[in-house]
Amino acid sequence: MSHNDIIQPSSVPILIAEDNRTQAEYLRYILEKEGYPVMLSTNGKEGLNLVNSNRPRLILTDVMMPEMDGYELCSAIKGDPSTADIPVILVTHLFNPVDVIKGLEAGADNFIIKPYTPEIIHTRIAGILQAVKKTESDECHEPLTVVFSDRSYTITATRLQIINILLSTYEVAIKNNTDLQVAQEKLHYMNDQMQKTLDKLQISNDDLIKENHERKMVETALGNANNKLQLMASITRHDLLNQINSLQGYLELAAMDRYDDPEQAWQYVDKAVAVLSQTVNTVQFTKEYQEIGVKSPVWQNCHNLVNKSLTHTSLNNVILENLIPEDLEIYADPLIEKVFSNLFENAVRYGGKITKISVRFMQDENTCRIICEDDGEGIKDDEKLKIFNYQYGKNTGQGLFLSREILSITGIQIEETGTYDVGARFEISCPGGTIRFTGSDI
């Protein structure tokens, strides 16, 4: 192309027919920035008047306008021999193939598809202005009838117009398809990221639920421990006062008879010593009891608890079978180790003919239980409940009472279900959330 063939924008006045003020001003801004003189009209009828009074070199018209739409404006311009050579570009969203056919029927020279960029505007205008220099005077312009969607359309456009329009629409289709693929890839990426985030949130939520559950269990356990301590403080205070009063009484009686009846006085002293021994046991029990619930419950390995409890007691010649699964854990007060040592100690001390102690785990549809049983004398039916009472038994009666209190901190229960003269059998029943295999609740 020679220097003389270059089209100067200042020599190409352009008419914009657009009823949307914002769109019209945006188009004018793009065109005037490149040096094109611009005229504005708000509808097709006003635009047609401007064409007749101020002949433009190019027309950009919106399709949807009041009074006269873009197709009608284009048909009117192309139907008038005096304006038929003015290129008309339709500006539309192009939602339907019928829009293309209607544009060809109206004689449009090209399309600009919304949304557009300044680059697209420049390309279309430059292409149209170059095409205007080419003549198709020898081409036959016989009307072409096209049937689409049960309607007939008569097209009189030239081959160049048809090609330009089809290329424009195809270009838009390719761009939209590319944009769609990019959008789909971004969507897939965002979906993957969102899924990862959801997975992390689910894990955090599960951890939070578990943490809240354990926190509530700890709060319940601490509340139970506080109530028990208050109760035991009241009980032991009453016991200590009785014992001290008895001790004081025996000592006063011994003092009164020390000269007149020394033998009787020494008997009172012996009774005072026995009461003092009870007082010491009560104080020792109070120390042990106050330790229950002081520390928060924790998950502990049951198999190891059974083995470690042997460090606190001697089995003599009794055999211990630890059949607890090695990955079983129990959620209980840290003092639970004393429960097993107490059960073993009682079995050896009071079991008589005992030769074996067995500890195992049982699970059915409703309960999970740890069974501690032996082949000794067993417990009489009328004593099965009493053995867990405070200060009941052949010794101090505090061991099984303490065991029951330690277990109850997390809602675990213990009962004796053996048969007398066959053997003792202690069942430790664990509610949900207090027993599990490593890594999973039961």
Image (tube, rainbow, N blue to C red):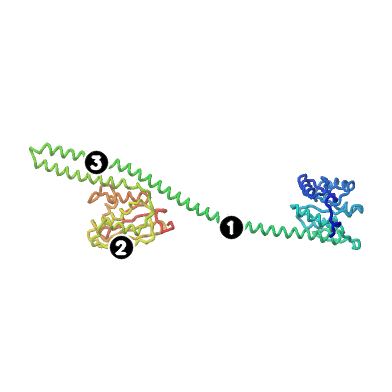
Q: Where, quadrant-wise, is the N terminus in this rendering?
A: bottom right
The residue under label 1 is 192
Amino acid type of the residue tagged 1 in the rendering: Asp
Residue 275 lies, in percent from the top left, at: 19, 43
Q: In this view, does 74 lie above or below 268?
A: below
Q: Which mark is residue 132?
A: none
Amino acid type of the residue tagged 2 in the rendering: Glu
Task: Categorize mark 1 by other alpha carbons within 10 Å: few (<14), some (14-19), many (20+).
Answer: few
The residues bearing labels 2 and 3 have C-alpha atoms spaced at a distance of 41 Å
The residue under label 3 is 240
Q: Nearer the viewer, residue 221 or 141?
A: 141
Residue 358 appears in which quarter of the rendering? bottom left
Between circles 1 and 2, the one closer to the viewer is: 1
Amino acid type of the residue tagged 3 in the rendering: Leu
Tell me the element at label 1: helix
Q: Which of 356 and 277 is in front in this view?
A: 277
Task: Categorize mark 2 by other alpha carbons within 10 Å: few (<14), some (14-19), many (20+).
Answer: few
Residue at far front of view: 3
Q: In this view, does 348 lie to the left or right of 71?
A: left
Q: Residue 321 carries which label?
A: 2
Tell me the element at label 3: helix
Disc with the residue nearer the chain's start (3 vs 1): 1
